[in-house]
Image: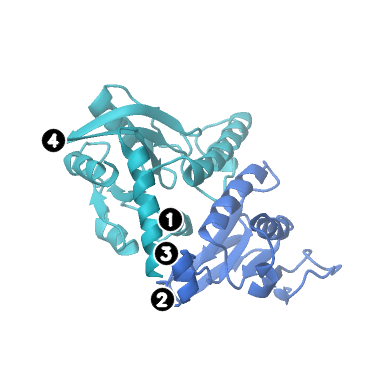
Chain colours: A cyan, B blue
Amino acid sequence: MGLLTNLRDSISRVTDGLFAADEPKRIGIYGPPNAGKTTLANRIARDWTGDAVGPESHIPHETRRARRKEDVEIERNGRKVTIDIVDTPGVTTKVDYKEFLDHDMEKDDAVRRSREATEGVAEAMHWLREDVDGVIYVLDSTTDPFTQVNTMLIGIIESQDLPALILANKTDLEGSDVQQIANAFPQHETIPLSALEGDNMDEVYTKIAEYFG
Amino acid sequence: MAGPKANVDAADDPDDGDDGVRIDMISGARMEGLTGMEKIRLILDGVREGNIVILEEGLSPDEESKLIEVTMTEISPDDFTGIEIETYPKAEAGDQSFLDKLMGRESTQKLTVIGPANRIETLHKDENLISTLVSRK
């Protein structure tokens, strides 16, 4: 076992050294719908590049295509990391166009939106298996984190051996419970923040540099 | 009211689906020889017929990822709105064999319940219990 493990570690170190250099890391922002992924992606992009990634909305599945913001340079404690932020659609196992009708949408628009949402989620799952180097997993700290989608996604991320940072978002809202998220995923560090208000972003950037640098 | 009935195998029951809810309980042995896509097809074919599928040993994380991806491609308005899936929270991998640990294989033995999203609703879930409400067609 020792020999095989050492061999595997050596190969890993060599390949890491070959590719780690100055290549930007593709960091996928994942999480359930309406967790604040796009708000966070926009906050990071605006803070470090001045541009936004995409429109934010309270309607679920506003983000229906993975959007990428390339070459975001984050400097922390004298250390610079370059990342490509990939803002992904909220992952779910079900999409019913009728839910969009509650948001003053005509049926045709709702059907189109649901079709785009399903394509976006499928694309996000594919990205997760093939095309990201690390994951920022965003959760709404006012909602129950013990959902099947969260459990499955964290399991998928762990099985890929991807570095993962869990963010408990929306701490500005009443009912925010960061500890509940920390309890749900005790194997990971949980960082509280309000992406909307920009609260605790300093710690978020420090952790991004630490995890993905 | 017709009660739920459990079928170990997919029998062609003329009453099937009219009043009751069909439950397919699929053993680990039945899934063992199947490829990932064959497992996903077996699950989704059953669920799209309105059945509840219970897997004795669950899916690997990679298979779960592909199940979500394939489910998304099959959702269509007024026909199929997706799946509801529940497993017990992942236990620590203390029961993995020496060979599994060596090869980096994860134990996927976790009872998994999958059903059509418009017919199954989770009422309660903790590490020991999954309670679901299944509606008839």
Identify the residue at image location x=66%, y=65%: B52
Calculate the distance from the C-alpha at mark 4 to the C-alpha at mark 3.
37 Å
Task: Answer yes or no: are tags 2 and 4 on the same subunit.
Answer: no
Q: Are marks 4 and 3 on the same chain?
A: yes
Disc 2 crowd rating (10 Å Cα; few below 14, some 14-19, many 20+) is few
| Residue linked to disc 2 | B94
| Label disc, if present, on residue A150 of the rendered structure | 1
Real-space Cα separation, disc 4 to disc 1, in angstroms: 34 Å
Chain ID for label 2?
B
CB atoms of marks 4 and 1 within 8 Å: no
For the residues bearing labels 4 and 3, Cβ distance under 8 angstroms: no
Is any part of residue A100 visible from this angle?
A: yes
Check disc 3 and report the residue beneath it: A4
Q: At numbered mark 4, what does the secondary structure look like: helix, strand or loop?
A: loop
Q: Are marks 3 and 2 on the same chain?
A: no
Identified by mark 3, the residue type is Leu
Which image quarter holds the C terminus of chain A? top left
Under mark 1, the amino acid is Asn
